[in-house]
Image (spheres, rainbow, N blue to C red):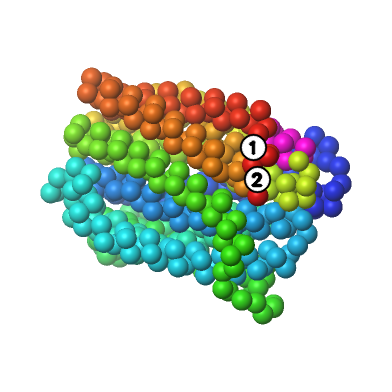
């Protein structure tokens, strides 16, 4: 395999580097696509229930991203160490890190879930929701936070497999998760009804749980996927199958210290960014239920554009991480340039697709004309930011690969809090939802520029583990 040449010290031509990037990026993009499709499915199905139900999901969605992102960031501190160990050819150490990661991530995620459960009731009121929206929003949020320990195992299993270089299993399992989400949501959201297909009618059983059904359906799909992901990692993955040897699951000081060096800035950065997104929700809330729903649907719709960026970013973390672990710094830098360039080209194309297809995408999510119109206008503003957004996403993945997370976290924090939020607060009263998305477009372009500058300077190679 081409990726083995990184560990063995063999020379890789530019064509081989590009081919390896594509080989790892494609399954990672499929995994991201399945995750995005789950959001589309939830949004489209809940959108059929009405504006209040749509707003109840949209109101707490950014808060859920905060909790999910914190748990995901914690797993990365261990995954990066595994990538470095695999690059250095030390599989025994990689397995020790995995055992310690399982214990550490479970303890952390249980604590985060407890905090989330405690604030589930008042949270929608803090965010400015009305009495028609708040009860359902609280219930939707509670279901997801209670499942956080199991969802964290999904993040950990997928991250470990990708850092080893196995993109196909996480990609395939995430596609399966998408299909399960469709099935579970279809049954749990809607009541029993008669469906006509090609002239044939049949009765489709349903629980009729509405917003609660959307949460239960998605969580159930993720739990099944988490079980299979961890089973493959611990039982089947070559070099990582911890069941083949005895070892301690007790975290050691050295592994935790290095995990904290990577994860702590990422966790703090994600918390402050999601805090800013929550602040944006507070800015949008006074604009009305239609604006809240349109904003939530537009955020979900836009994710189809940046899905390739995060997929390529995952590949960048693996390629740069293993090159860095093998002490091949020139190769790590070349992989950084290749992956960022590929991400920018891909997301530019996706931005064009988004601009053209915005009306169709919004109509898929909501039958309400005002929501569709507001969402289309927002998406067409955002489409112009996609190339530079790609630069920030993939360059961040490159820097994570070497374990450099402090400066990128500060860059993300400063960009969103010092550029996006002030602009959104300034423009929203006069431009409405379009002003909020104009601020987002300007900020993402600025963020991409500063990440490109740092990538080209190369200082990130000196800040790794």
Residue 40: x, y in percent?
A: 40, 45
Q: In the displayed image of the protein, which residue is found farthest to the right?
A: 10
Q: Which residues are magenta?
A: 330-339
**Label 1: how many residues lie within 10 Å, few (<14), some (14-19) or many (20+)?**
many
Determine the residue positioned at 62% across, 53% down: 80
Q: Which residue is mark 1?
A: 460
Q: Is residue 414 magenta?
A: no
Provide the major secondary structure of the magenta segment.
helix
Classify mark 2: residues with Cα within 10 Å, few (<14), some (14-19) or many (20+): some
Residue that protrudes farthest toward the left in the picture:
131
* Residue 301 pos. (x, y %): 40, 38
Residues 258 and 247: in front is 258
Residue 20: where, in percent of width, then height? Answer: 74, 44
Identify residue for label 2. 464
CB-based contact (under 8 Å), mark 2 and mark 1 = yes
Which disc, if any, is residue 304?
Answer: none
Q: Is residue 189 visible?
A: no
Left or right? Give the position of 134 relative to 263: left
Question: Which of the two residues, 71 or 290, is positioned nearer the viewer here?
Answer: 71
Does residue 438 appear in this view? yes
Marks 2 and 1, how far apart at CA = 7 Å
Q: Residue at x 30, y 65 (%)?
A: 205
Element on which disc 1 rests: helix
Say left or right for 427 vs 345.
left
Q: Is residue 53 left or right of residue 407?
A: left
The residue lying toward the viewer, choosing from 336 and 260, is: 260
Element marked by disc 2: loop
Q: Tell how many labels.
A: 2
- The quadrant in which residue 374 appears is top left
Taking 167 as reference, is 308 above or below it?
above
In the rendered image, the vertical position of residue 167 relative to residue 432, given as above or below: below
Q: Residue at x 38, y 33 (%)?
A: 417
């Amino acid at each position: 395999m081409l990726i083995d040449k990184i560990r063995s010290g063999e020379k890789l031509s530019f064509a081989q580097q590009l081919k390896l990037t594509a080989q790892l990026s494609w399954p990672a993009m499929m995994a991201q696509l399945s995750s995005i499709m789950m959001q589309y499915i939830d949004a489209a199905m809940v959108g059929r229930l009405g504006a209040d139900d749509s707003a109840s999901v949209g109101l707490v969605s950014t808060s859920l991203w905060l909790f999910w992102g914190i748990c995901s960031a914690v797993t990365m501190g261990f995954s990066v160490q595994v990538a470095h160990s695999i690059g250095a050819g030390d599989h025994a150490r990689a397995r020790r890190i995995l055992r310690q990661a399982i214990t550490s991530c479970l303890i952390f995620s249980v604590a985060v879930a407890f905090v989330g459960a405690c604030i589930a009731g008042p949270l929608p009121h803090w965010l400015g929701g009305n009495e028609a929206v708040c009860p359902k929003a609280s219930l939707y949020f509670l279901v997801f936070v209670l499942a956080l320990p199991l969802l964290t195992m999904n993040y950990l299993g997928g991250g470990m497999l990708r850092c080893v270089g196995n993109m196909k299993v996480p990609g395939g399992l995430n596609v399966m998760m998408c299909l399960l989400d469709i099935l579970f949501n279809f049954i749990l959201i809607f009541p029993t009804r008669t469906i006509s297909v090609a002239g044939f009618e049949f009765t489709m059983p349903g629980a009729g749980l509405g917003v609660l059904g959307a949460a239960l359906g998605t969580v159930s799909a993720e739990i099944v996927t988490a079980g299979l992901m961890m089973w493959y990692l611990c039982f089947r993955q070559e070099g990582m199958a911890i069941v083949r040897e005895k070892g301690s699951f007790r975290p050691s000081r050295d592994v935790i210290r290095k995990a904290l060096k990577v994860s702590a800035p990422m966790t703090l950065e994600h918390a402050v960014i999601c805090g800013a997104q929550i602040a944006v929700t507070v800015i949008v809330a006074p604009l009305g239920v239609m604006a809240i729903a349109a904003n939530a649907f537009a955020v979900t719709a836009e994710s189809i554009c940046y899905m390739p960026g995060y997929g390529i970013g995952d590949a960048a973390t693996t390629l740069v991480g293993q090159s860095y672990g093998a002490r091949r710094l020139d190769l790590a830098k070349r992989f950084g340039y290749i992956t960022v360039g590929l991400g920018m080209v891909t997301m530019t194309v996706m931005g064009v697709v988004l601009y053209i297809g915005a009306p169709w995408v919004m109509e898929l999510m909501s039958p309400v004309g005002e929501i569709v119109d507001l969402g289309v206008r927002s998406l067409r503003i955002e489409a112009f930011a996609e190339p530079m957004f790609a630069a920030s996403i993939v360059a961040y993945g490159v820097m994570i690969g070497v374990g450099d997370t402090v400066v990128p976290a500060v860059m993300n924090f400063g960009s969103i809090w010092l550029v996006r939020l002030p602009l959104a607060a300034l423009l929203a009263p006069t431009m409405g939802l379009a002003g909020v998305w104009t601020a987002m477009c300007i900020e993402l372009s600025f963020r991409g520029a500063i990440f490109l500058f740092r990538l080209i300077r190369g200082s990130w190679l000196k800040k790794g583990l």
